[in-house]
Image: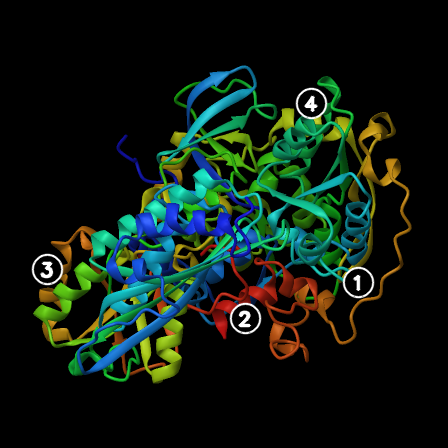
C-alpha cells in the first residue's frame, strides 16, 4: 500500500489525468493535486496522483548520491 | 443446455462438437476405450485439470490452455506427445457458442501439434455444481531411453547453466487483466503455447540438457526451489539477466507482485551443461517460443538446497517459496 | 509505443550507485547505532534488495510500526467481517487486508464462504461499485496512514457530490506522529528514524520536528529505491556521528517542506483525530482518524449497528515488541513453526510487508 509509482501525464480532462507508467495506461484522479499538466511526472498511489516529481530535484539527488570524493579527502 | 445424461441431447453435443472438431478415426469409433498402436519402449503419461477463471483471456482460453498445458508436461519430461484425452464437466446453462469456441481452440492446438484427441467424456451438472466449465486432459508421449532422467533433475551438476525461454509473468498478469479487477490498460497476453517444437530441437542438438520443467503455478521461483531442495544443490540467479516484459514489470511494481512467482503457460526452466549452453540457446532462439531465451544463472556448489537471487542493486536474497497464491485459479 | 522503461525507478537501483553510497557509509560510520525504518514499504525494499549486505556492522536496522496492515486491530477485521455478513452489503478492501486474521476468521475465508468481498486497487473503484450497484450498500475498509487517508476523504466528498448514498467508509486510518513519539519516548534504543517518504509527501516535514528537537533523534525522510534508502542511512549516520540532530529530506524529488496542502485540507475536512487501537501497541491517544459528524452519513461505524466482540491477542504472540523494535522475529516462540505466511497468527506475519513475513521470506 505504500506502493507509489512515477507516471507521466498524457491527457487531462476535468479531475482525471490519463497517465503512462512505461506503456501501461491508467486514468488517475487529480482530486488531491493542483495544476496537473500534460508532460508532468506524478506519483501514482492507489488511484490518485498525490504529488508531482520535480526533475531538477531528481537530478540533484543523483548528484548527491555520487558525491564521495570530498569524503575520501578527509 | 439439457445435454447431461446420455439422452439425445448428449448425443447431439458429442456429434456436433467433439466428434466434429476432434476429427480422427479413433475418436469416431466412439468405443469405451481408445485402442492405440504404440511402439515398444517408454511411455510418458500425464494428466491435468483446468479450472481457470475467466474462461477467455487475452492470448487464449481454457481450451487452448488445456491442450498446451498437457503437451508441455509431456515435452518438458523429454517425451514426444502423441495422444490426448479430454474430459468436460459442464454447468447446466453454459452457452453452446462458448463451448464451441473452446472446443475449436482445442482442436486447432492439437492439430498444430500433430497430436490426436482420441477419447473423452462429458458430464453436465446442475447449475451451481461447477463454475461454468472444467476440463481435464491426459496425455501420452513416447520417450527415448536417453531422456528418461530429464524430469527428475538428478543429472544436474554445479556449473550447469539455468535457462529461461522468455520473460516470466505474462500468463498470470494477462488473466488478472481479464478479471477486470483493475482499470489499467495493457496489451498483456498469455504466453500459452506448445513448447514441444522448441524442446525437440534442444534435445536433437544437445545431449547435455540435464533438466527441464515448465514454470506454471508458483512460477519460476517454485521450479527453482523444488530443484534446489530435491537435488540438494545450490542455485544462483542474476536479476539483471532475466528477460523482462515491460508491462508485467510495471504491473508488478504497481501491485507489489514479483514476476518470479507469477504463473506462466509457455515458459520453461532448462538446466544445460556449461559446454553446450550457448549452442542450446542459439537453437532455442530460432524457434517461435524461444526468441528471448537467456541464461539467467547457474547451479553452484554452495548454499545447497537454496535458490538465491542477486538483485539489480547488487544485494542478494533467498528466493523463497510463495506461501499461498498471489492470484487464485490461475490455471 | 516504445516503452521508456520505468523512469525515476530504474536509475535509482543501479548497482554501481548503490556500491558507491555503501562505501560512503563505511567511511564515516564509527558508533554502534540503531536506525528504525517506519514504513512497510521500506521494510520490504530493504529485504527484497538485500540492502543489509551493504551496511557495516556498526549499523543495526529496526523495523517499526509503519505497516498499516500489521497494526490494524483484530477488532477492525472482526467489524468488517460482521458488516460483510449483512445481506446486501458489498465489502471493498485493499488486497493487503484479505488474509489478516480476525479473532475467528479472515476476509479471505469469508469471501470463500458467504460474503461479497471485492479487492480494489483504489477507493475510487469501491465508489464506482457503489455507483453501479444502487441496491447494495458498499463498505470500503479504510486502512493506511496519511498517504491513503486523503484518498478516502476525497472519495467521501465525491460520494456526497454525486449523491452516492450507498457508499460507506469504515475508517481504520491512523497517523504517524503519536506512534513515533511513543517510540522515541520509550526504552528501545533508537538513534535515528528513516521516515516514510509517501506519508511525508502529504504531511511535509513538520510532523517530525519533535523527534529531533525534543527527543534528539536524527530523522531523514526517505524514498523507496535502494539508492534512496542507503543515502538516507548515510545522512542519518552523519547526523548521529556529529551529534547534530535535525529533520532532513532525501526524497526531495517528491517531498516538499509544506507537503501537499490540498490533500491535507481534504483529509482534515473529513477526518478528526481520535484514539485508536494499534495491534501490538494497544490504544495510542489521538493516533487514529475518525469521520467527522458532518459526514456521518458515510460512516460505516455509525450507519450499521453490529456488536463487535472484545478481542484478546493470541497467546504467545509478541508482535507488539517486534513492532516497537524491542524483539526480532526469531525471538518469538511461534515464529515459523506455528506462525508463518501460510498460517499467520500475528500481524507482523500477516502482511507482506510485516517484519516477520519479510524475515521469513528473505532471511531464512
Residue A53 placed where, x, y %? Answer: 45, 31
Callouts 3 and 2 on one subunit: no
Q: Residue C158 carries which label?
A: 4
Task: Check whether the beta carbons of the residues at disc 2 and disc 1 lie within 8 A of each other.
Answer: no
Dot 1 or dot 4, earlier in sequence: 1
Callouts 1 and 3 on one subunit: no
Total number of numbered labels? 4
Q: Is residue B271 left or right of residue C360?
A: left
Q: Which mark is residue B282?
A: 3
Nearest to the eye among marks 3 and 2: give it: 3
Dot 2 or dot 1, earlier in sequence: 1
Callouts 2 and 1 on one subunit: yes
Q: Is residue B85 left or right of residue B275?
A: right
Q: Mark 3 lies on which chain?
A: B
Alpha carbon separation for disc pair 2 and 1: 23 Å
Label 4 SS: helix
CA neighbours of label 3 inside 10 A, class few (<14), some (14 to 19), many (20+): some
Residue placed under numbered mark 2 in the picture: C360
Alpha carbon separation for disc pair 3 and 2: 39 Å
Alpha carbon separation for disc pair 1 and 4: 34 Å
CA neighbours of label 4 inside 10 A, class few (<14), some (14 to 19), many (20+): some
In front of the other: C217 or B196: B196
Residue B185 visible to the viewer: yes
* Residue depicted at x 66% and y 72%: C327
Amino acid at each position: 500500500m505504500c506502493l507509489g509509482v512515477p507516471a507521466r501525464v498524457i491527457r487531462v480532462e476535468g479531475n482525471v489525468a490519463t497517465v503512462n507508467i512505461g506503456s501501461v495506461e491508467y486514468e488517475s484522479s487529480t482530486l488531491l493535486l493542483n495544476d496537473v499538466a500534460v508532460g508532468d511526472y506524478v506519483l501514482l498511489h492507489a488511484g490518485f496522483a498525490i504529488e508531482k516529481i520535480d526533475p531538477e530535484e531528481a537530478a540533484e539527488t543523483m548528484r548527491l548520491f555520487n558525491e564521495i570524493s570530498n569524503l575520501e579527502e578527509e | 443446455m439439457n445435454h447431461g445424461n446420455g439422452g439425445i441431447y448428449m448425443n447431439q453435443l458429442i456429434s456436433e462438437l467433439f466428434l466434429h472438431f476432434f476429427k480422427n478415426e479413433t475418436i469416431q469409433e466412439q468405443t469405451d476405450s481408445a485402442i492405440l498402436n504404440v511402439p515398444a519402449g517408454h511411455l510418458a503419461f500425464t494428466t491435468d485439470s483446468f479450472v481457470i477463471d475467466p474462461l477467455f483471456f487475452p492470448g487464449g482460453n481454457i481450451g487452448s490452455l488445456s491442450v498446451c498445458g498437457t503437451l508441455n508436461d509431456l515435452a518438458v519430461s523429454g517425451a514426444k506427445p502423441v495422444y490426448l484425452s479430454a474430459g468436460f464437466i459442464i454447468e447446466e446453462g453454459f452457452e453452446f457458442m462458448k463451448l464451441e469456441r473452446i472446443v475449436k481452440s482445442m482442436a486447432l492446438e492439437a492439430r498444430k501439434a500433430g497430436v490426436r484427441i482420441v477419447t473423452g467424456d462429458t458430464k453436465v451438472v446442475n447449475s451451481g455444481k461447477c463454475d461454468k466449465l472444467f476440463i481435464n486432459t491426459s496425455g501420452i508421449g513416447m520417450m527415448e531411453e536417453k531422456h528418461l532422467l530429464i524430469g527428475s533433475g538428478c543429472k544436474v551438476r554445479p556449473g550447469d547453466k539455468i535457462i529461461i525461454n522468455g520473460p516470466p509473468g505474462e500468463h498470470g498478469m494477462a488473466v488478472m487483466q481479464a478479471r477486470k479487477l483493475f482499470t489499467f490498460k495493457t496489451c498483456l497476453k498469455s504466453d500459452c503455447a506448445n513448447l514441444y517444437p522448441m524442446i525437440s530441437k534442444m534435445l536433437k542438438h544437445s545431449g547435455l540438457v540435464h533438466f527441464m520443467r515448465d514454470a506454471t503455478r508458483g512460477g519460476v521461483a517454485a521450479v527453482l526451489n523444488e530443484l534446489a531442495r530435491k537435488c540438494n544443490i545450490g542455485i544462483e540467479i542474476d536479476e539483471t539477466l532475466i528477460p523482462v516484459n515491460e508491462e508485467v514489470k510495471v504491473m508488478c511494481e504497481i501491485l507489489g507482485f514479483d514476476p518470479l512467482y507469477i504463473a506462466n503457460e509457455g515458459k520453461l526452466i532448462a538446466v544445460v551443461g556449461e559446454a553446450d549452453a550457448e549452442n542450446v540457446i542459439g537453437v532455442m532462439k530460432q524457434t517461435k517460443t524461444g526468441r528471448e531465451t537467456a541464461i539467467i544463472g547457474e547451479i553452484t556448489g554452495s548454499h545447497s538446497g537454496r535458490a538465491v537471487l542477486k538483485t539489480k542493486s547488487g544485494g542478494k536474497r533467498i528466493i523463497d517459496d510463495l506461501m499461498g497464491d498471489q492470484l487464485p485459479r490461475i490455471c | 509505443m516504445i516503452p521508456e522503461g520505468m523512469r525515476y525507478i530504474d536509475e535509482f537501483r543501479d548497482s554501481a550507485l548503490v556500491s558507491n553510497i555503501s562505501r560512503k557509509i563505511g567511511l564515516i560510520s564509527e558508533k554502534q547505532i540503531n536506525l528504525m525504518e517506519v514504513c512497510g514499504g521500506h521494510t520490504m525494499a530493504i529485504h527484497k534488495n538485500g540492502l543489509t549486505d551493504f551496511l557495516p556492522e556498526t549499523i543495526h536496522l529496526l523495523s517499526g510500526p509503519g505497516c498499516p496492515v500489521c497494526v490494524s486491530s483484530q477488532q477492525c477485521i472482526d467489524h468488517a467481517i460482521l458488516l460483510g455478513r449483512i445481506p446486501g452489503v458489498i465489502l471493498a478492501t485493499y488486497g493487503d487486508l484479505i488474509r489478516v486474521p480476525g479473532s475467528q476468521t479472515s476476509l479471505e475465508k469469508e469471501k470463500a464462504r458467504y460474503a461479497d468481498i471485492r479487492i480494489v486497487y483504489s477507493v475510487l473503484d469501491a465508489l464506482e461499485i457503489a455507483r453501479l450497484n444502487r441496491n447494495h450498500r458498499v463498505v470500503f475498509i479504510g486502512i493506511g496512514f496519511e498517504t491513503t487517508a486523503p484518498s478516502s476523504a476525497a472519495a467521501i466528498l465525491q460520494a456526497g457530490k454525486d449523491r452516492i448514498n450507498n457508499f460507506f467508509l469504515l475508517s481504520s486510518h491512523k497517523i504517524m506522529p503519536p506512534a513515533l513519539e511513543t517510540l522515541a519516548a520509550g526504552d528501545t534504543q533508537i538513534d535515528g528514524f528513516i521516515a516514510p517518504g509517501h506519508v511525508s509527501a502529504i504531511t511535509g516535514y513538520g510532523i517530525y520536528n519533535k523527534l529531533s528537537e525534543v527527543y534528539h533523534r536524527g530523522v531523514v525522510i526517505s524514498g523507496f529505491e535502494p539508492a534512496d534508502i542507503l543515502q538516507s542511512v548515510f545522512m542519518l549516520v552523519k547526523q548521529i556521528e556529529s551529534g547534530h540532530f535535525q529533520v532532513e529530506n532525501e526524497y526531495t524529488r517528491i517531498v516538499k517542506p509544506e507537503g501537499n496542502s490540498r490533500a491535507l485540507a481534504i483529509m482534515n475536512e473529513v477526518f478528526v483525530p481520535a484514539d485508536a487501537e494499534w495491534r501490538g501497541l494497544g490504544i495510542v491517544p489521538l493516533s487514529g482518524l475518525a469521520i467527522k459528524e458532518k459526514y456521518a452519513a458515510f460512516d460505516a461505524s455509525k450507519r450499521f449497528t453490529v456488536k463487535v466482540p472484545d478481542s484478546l491477542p493470541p497467546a504467545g504472540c509478541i508482535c507488539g515488541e517486534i513492532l516497537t523494535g524491542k524483539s526480532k522475529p526469531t525471538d518469538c516462540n511461534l515464529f515459523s513453526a506455528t506462525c508463518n505466511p501460510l498460517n499467520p497468527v500475528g500481524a507482523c506475519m500477516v502482511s507482506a510487508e510485516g517484519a516477520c513475513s519479510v524475515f521469513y521470506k528473505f532471511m531464512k
